[in-house]
C-alpha cells in the first residue's frame, strides 16, 4: 500500500454551489467551465457539486466527483458535507437576487462558521430589495476570502447593499466554454431548413429576475422583429430555449408572427456545448437570455441584445453591441433601425467584436487565477477563516 508523505498536503475537497441541475443552459455552461477550471488548477482535487437535481448533474457533469442534493435535505446532513470541505466556491452566475440569495448564502455562512474558506466565482447580483436578502449578502460576502463578480452592474449592486470589501470584476465563466458539434442531422430533426439564412432568437419568462417585462408587449415586439427579419433578410427564425419555460413564450411569439411558417422552436434537449455549436449555423442573433448572447458573441455573430435586466445591458456595453434600454413595444422603431444598421455594418464591425470577446475571455480566466491563489494558501488558514466568518453582524443559519 502506498502512503502519502506527511510533507505533501492532501489534495483539497472543493465544493461548488450554484443553480445547477439542468434548470438553465447558461447555468450548466457556467458549471462546466468552473469545474474545468478547478480540475486544471488541482487535477487530483475532490470536486463536490451541490445540485438542485443531483441525478441530472451526475449524468451530465463527468468532472464532478460527488453530487449531494441540498434542497429538502436535513440540515445536519448538509453541515456534515460542508465540514469536510477545504474550499466552497459560490457560483458563478446570477444567483444573488431577491428570494434566492438568502437560500444559497445560508450554506456559505454555515461553511464559514465551520472554518471553510469561501470564494465567489464571478457571481452576478440583483435585484436586491428584500431586507433579508440584503442582510445575507452584506454579511456573508463581507466575510468571504475573495469576491469576484462577473460585471460592473453587480459590483454597483453590492456597493449599494453595503458590502464593504474589495470586489474584483472579471467576466462570465461561460465565455470559456468549448463548442460541441450540432450536426446537419440534428438541424434536420428540428425541421430547420438547410442552406437558408437563419436568425437565432431567445426569449424568456417574466419573473423576479425580469420583473419589468410586460408579457403581451414583449411578445408582440419580438414577433414584429421576427417578421421584419423574414422580410428584410429572407430568413428563417430559430427560437432557442435556454430554460423549459422559454418554450411557451417562444410559441406565444410565433403565434403573433405574420409569417409563422418561417419560424421553428428547438424541441430537443442539448448540452451547453451543443447550443454553442449550433451558433455556427446562424447568421444573426437577437436575444434576451444572457448566455445565448454570450454563445453568439463567442461564435463571432452579429448580436442584438434585448436588455430586460442590467446584466444584459452590461454585456452589450462590454461587447460594443447596440445598448437599447428596455424591452417594450415603444422600442420597436429604434430596434428595427438598429437591426438594419447592425446587418449592414457588421463586416466592418466584426474585428472589433472578436477583439472584445478575446479581452472578455482573458478576464474570465483571471477568476481561475485568483481561485488558484486561494487554493495555494489553504494549509494552515482555517482558523483565520473561522474568525472572519464570525466577524460583523450575526446572520442565522436556519434549517433547510
Image (cartoon, grey):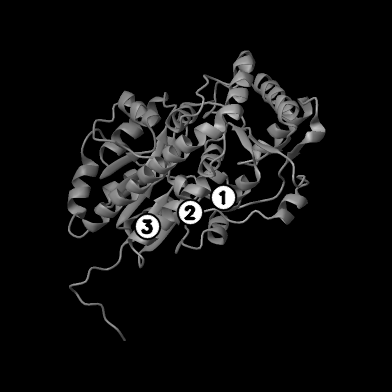
Q: Is mark 2 on a helix, strand or loop?
A: helix
Residue beneath label 1, please? 272
Q: Which residue is drawn at 45% across and 38% down?
A: 95
Q: How crowded is mark 3: few (under 14 residues within 10 Å), some or many (20 or more)?
A: many
Given contact means CB atoms under 8 Å apart, are the residues at marks 2 and 3 in contact?
no
User: On the rendered structure, is 200 left or right of 60?
Assistant: right
Q: Where is residue 9 in the image (x, y as percent from the top left)?
A: 23, 68
Tell whether label 2 touches label 1 (CB within 8 Å): yes
Above-or-below relation of 48 to 354: below
Residue furthest to the front in view is: 348
Q: Does label 1 or label 2 sit earlier along the sequence?
A: 2
The foreground one among 363 and 88 is 363
Name the image quarter holding residue 399.
top left
In whole angstroms, how far apart are the C-alphas of marks 1 and 2?
9 Å
Residue under label 2, please give it. Answer: 32
**Quarter placement of the C terminus:** top left
Horizontal arrangement in the rendering, residue 318 relative to residue 114 (left or right): right
**Residue ranking furthest to the bottom:** 1
Residue sitting at x 24%, y 43%: 389
Question: Mark on residue 38?
Answer: 3
In the image: residue 229, left or right of residue 326: right
How far apart are the alpha carbons under marks 1 and 3? 19 Å
Amino acid at each position: 500500500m502506498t502512503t502519502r508523505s506527511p510533507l505533501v498536503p492532501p489534495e483539497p475537497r472543493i465544493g461548488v454551489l450554484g443553480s445547477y441541475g439542468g434548470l438553465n443552459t447558461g447555468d450548466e455552461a457556467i458549471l462546466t467551465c468552473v469545474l474545468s477550471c478547478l480540475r486544471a488548477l488541482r487535477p487530483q482535487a475532490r470536486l463536490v457539486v451541490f445540485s438542485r437535481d443531483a441525478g441530472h448533474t451526475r449524468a451530465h457533469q463527468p468532472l464532478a466527483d460527488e453530487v449531494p442534493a441540498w434542497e429538502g435535505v436535513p440540515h445536519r446532513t448538509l453541515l456534515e458535507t460542508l465540514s469536510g470541505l477545504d474550499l466552497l466556491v459560490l457560483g458563478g452566475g446570477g444567483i444573488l437576487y431577491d428570494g434566492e440569495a438568502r437560500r444559497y448564502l445560508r450554506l456559505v455562512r454555515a461553511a464559514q462558521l465551520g472554518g471553510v474558506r469561501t470564494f465567489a466565482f464571478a457571481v452576478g447580483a440583483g435585484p436586491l430589495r428584500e431586507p433579508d436578502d440584503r442582510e445575507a449578502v452584506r454579511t456573508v460576502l463581507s466575510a468571504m476570502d475573495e469576491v469576484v463578480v462577473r460585471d460592473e452592474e453587480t459590483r454597483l449592486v453590492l456597493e449599494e447593499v453595503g458590502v464593504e470589501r474589495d470586489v474584483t470584476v472579471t467576466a462570465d465563466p461561460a465565455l470559456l466554454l468549448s463548442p460541441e458539434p450540432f450536426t446537419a442531422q440534428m438541424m434536420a430533426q428540428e425541421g430547420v431548413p438547410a442552406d437558408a439564412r437563419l436568425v437565432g432568437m431567445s426569449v424568456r419568462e417574466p419573473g423576479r429576475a425580469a420583473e419589468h417585462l410586460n408579457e403581451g408587449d414583449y411578445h408582440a415586439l419580438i414577433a414584429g422583429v421576427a417578421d421584419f427579419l423574414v422580410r428584410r433578410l429572407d430568413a428563417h427564425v430559430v427560437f432557442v430555449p435556454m430554460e423549459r419555460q422559454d418554450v411557451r413564450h417562444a410559441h406565444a411569439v410565433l403565434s403573433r408572427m405574420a409569417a409563422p411558417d418561417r419560424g421553428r422552436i428547438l424541441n430537443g434537449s442539448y448540452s451547453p456545448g451543443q447550443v454553442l455549436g449550433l451558433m455556427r449555423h446562424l447568421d444573426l442573433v437577437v436575444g434576451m437570455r444572457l448566455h445565448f448572447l454570450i454563445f453568439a458573441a463567442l461564435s463571432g455573430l452579429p448580436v442584438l441584445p434585448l436588455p430586460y435586466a442590467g446584466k444584459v445591458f452590461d454585456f452589450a456595453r462590454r461587447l460594443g453591441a447596440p445598448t437599447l434600454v428596455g424591452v417594450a413595444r415603444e422600442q420597436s422603431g429604434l430596434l428595427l433601425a438598429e437591426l438594419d444598421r447592425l446587418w449592414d455594418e457588421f463586416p466592418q464591425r466584426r474585428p472589433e467584436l472578436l477583439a472584445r470577446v478575446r479581452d472578455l475571455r482573458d478576464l474570465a480566466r483571471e477568476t481561475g487565477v485568483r481561485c488558484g491563489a486561494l487554493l495555494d494558501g489553504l494549509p494552515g488558514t482555517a482558523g483565520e477563516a473561522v474568525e472572519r466568518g464570525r466577524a460583523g453582524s450575526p446572520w442565522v443559519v436556519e434549517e433547510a
